[in-house]
Amino acid sequence: MLDFFTIFSKGGLVLWCFQGVRGPAATAPVNALIRSVLLQERGGNNSFTHEALTLKYKLDNQFELVFVVGFQKILTLTYVDKLIDDVHKEFRDKYRNEFQQKGALGLLNGTFDFKDDFMRLLRDAEESSKVRAPTVMKTFEQSLKSQKTVKCMIETRGEKPKEKVKNKKNKGSKKDGTEAVAVPSKASVSDKQLSAAGEKEELTKDEILQKNREEFFRRHMKAGEKSRSPKPDAQKEKGKKPRVWDLGNSNAKVLDYSNSATNGSAEACPVEEFDPDMALGDKNRVPGRLYDLEYESDDEAEEEKVVQNPSKPSVKKGGLGGMFGMLKGLVGSKSLTREDMDPVLEKMKDHLIAKNVAAEIAVQLCESVAKKLEGKVMGTFTTVTSTVKQALQEALVQILQPQRRVDVLRDVMDAQRHRRPYVVTFCGVNGVGKSTNLAKAGQDPDHRTGISFWLIENGFSVLIAACDTFRAGAVEQLRTHTRRLNALHPPESHGGRTMVQLYEKGYGKDAAGIAMEAISYARNQGFDVVLVDTAGRMQDNAPLMTALAKLIAVNAPDLVLFVGEALVGNEAVDQLVKFNKALADHSMAQTPRLIDGIVLTKFDTIDDKVGAAISMTYITSKPIVFVGTGQTYCDLRSLNAKAVVAALMKA
């Protein structure tokens, strides 16, 4: 039983609707489908679940139409796919002329009386699902085994099966020279064997045995003579000679640094003292501003390659062949088919995987682009490759701009008006940089960047809660962070107000309790922001995931940020899915609190392999709030979707 079936244009105009059961209208589930799937370029799967309903949809890219059917997800309706295909074909064939002649005006002013046709197609689809007979087991006469004879199933001892002999590869196939000589000799041997086989049929068994013995001894005598052949006088020198490179230095003493006086000495590597000017990095920056991520794309170089590629076939095939070769890739005002796009999409999928996009996500992206373009009419001088690439770029930009944008500064000011601290919790696996990105500080002043520094520069006081009570040195690390930040922003510069402070209770304590005490302390002392640092944990560790869910459920932070590396590919999907699942499973609340945003670290180490950003955003629909791109306090960036896509699409 269908709940509804609706047909609407991509512009949002409902052309026809069928309501199967009494109840709420189809507006809410269809709007959820548009918001979560169609606008977010997640059309790889034609099914979508909204509360108790399952929605299946089909796109008509030629006339910009969307067909959606909804039914209860507890039902198993096998005819839905056939029904939506039949309705799509019937509706577009019936109103094709109206769409082609009137265009958008035809949608606005047209009347679409489709109820009788729909009910007929629905009855046919339901009857076709009932008519299907149950599958019957094959009889022995229908099986392949019945066709085999007894003779072919008898195996002689010592005889090799024919299939194995055919599939056996020649070990000497790598030697091209010997292979050419060996081919005719094999043919002559096979001829001799055939003639010998004919003679053996005429001889008696005793004569055959005697002949085989003589042949056996003859072969062994030849093998013995070869083994007794004299060895060459020129013996190879024992030992291994070092390889001498053409452009290298043959003198090994030049490369020997073992006796260097400066190697390992403390005087040669003096400890660098903390310098606030070096920690700040760019002196021309605007204090407190979070700059966008930048990337210089090579669009001009790519355009030159596209222009040069069609000229290559013309050299081999001549002027006429080159012209036809160039026009072969052009689509002259015809609809795109799946066969046209498959070779291009396959290359695009391999390109995305090479750029560190998770394999599953790359397949879904290409499938979504194929559904978006299938049936679309292209221009005369538009190539399939450029069309697919442009659609993929638009899809990637749309994915990196999710539904909800996180504006931390605005939310902090809103919390100030309510006289309460704004609480941010950081979680993630081990070693991704949770404590580091709170406020990086170490022996080397060039290696630091942090969210605390950005908040302090915007005039907000920060309390860091040391809730990593498991890892040795975690509290001392945060204490060093706090000392360095107070050196950069001393209380004298802020009217005697301490801008950053550490709340710690040592090791082995309950992290949820420490976070609760820190939030209460921040409320009493008037701190604007509380940054909760948690212990790193693997996504498969159930006890630690339970503790994290407890910390988030008890303290109800305003923002839960997942800290992930830009170096991971498929692992990013596994981490985010299992973190969200663990938070949902181990939370006692009716509506569990999940991850709100992502902090992508180590972005300056991956060059143009930025696929982890796509994987993380696609799998969670959550925004990337911060990007760590460098080694100073000021190298914290906000995500620029176009810059990331430009790096991703770079050849």
Image (cartoon, rainbow, N blue to C red):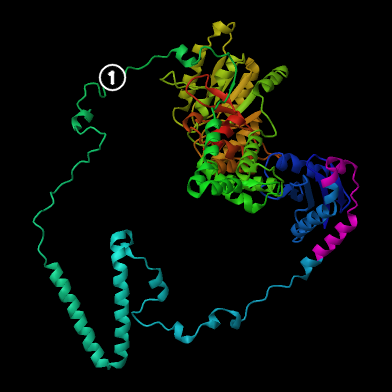
Q: Nearer the viewer, residue 498 or 5?
A: 5
Q: Residue tagged by mark 1?
A: 266
Q: Amino acid at mark 1?
A: Ala
Dot 1: within a 10 Å radius of its alpha carbon, few (fewer than 14), some, or many (20 or more) residues? few
* Residue 123 in magenta stretch: yes
Q: Nearer the viewer, residue 554 or 254?
A: 254
Image quadrant assignment for residue 114? bottom right
Residue 295's x, y, as percent? 54, 27
Q: Secondary structure at mark 1?
A: loop
Residue 454 position (above or below residue 104): above
Give the residues in magenta: 100-126
Residue 312's x, y, as percent? 50, 44
Q: Quadrant of the N terminus?
A: bottom right
Residue shown at 28% from the left, 62% from the top: 178
Q: Left of 372 or right of it: where is 264?
A: left
* Residue 45 in magenta stretch: no
Q: Left of 336 or right of it: where is 228?
A: left
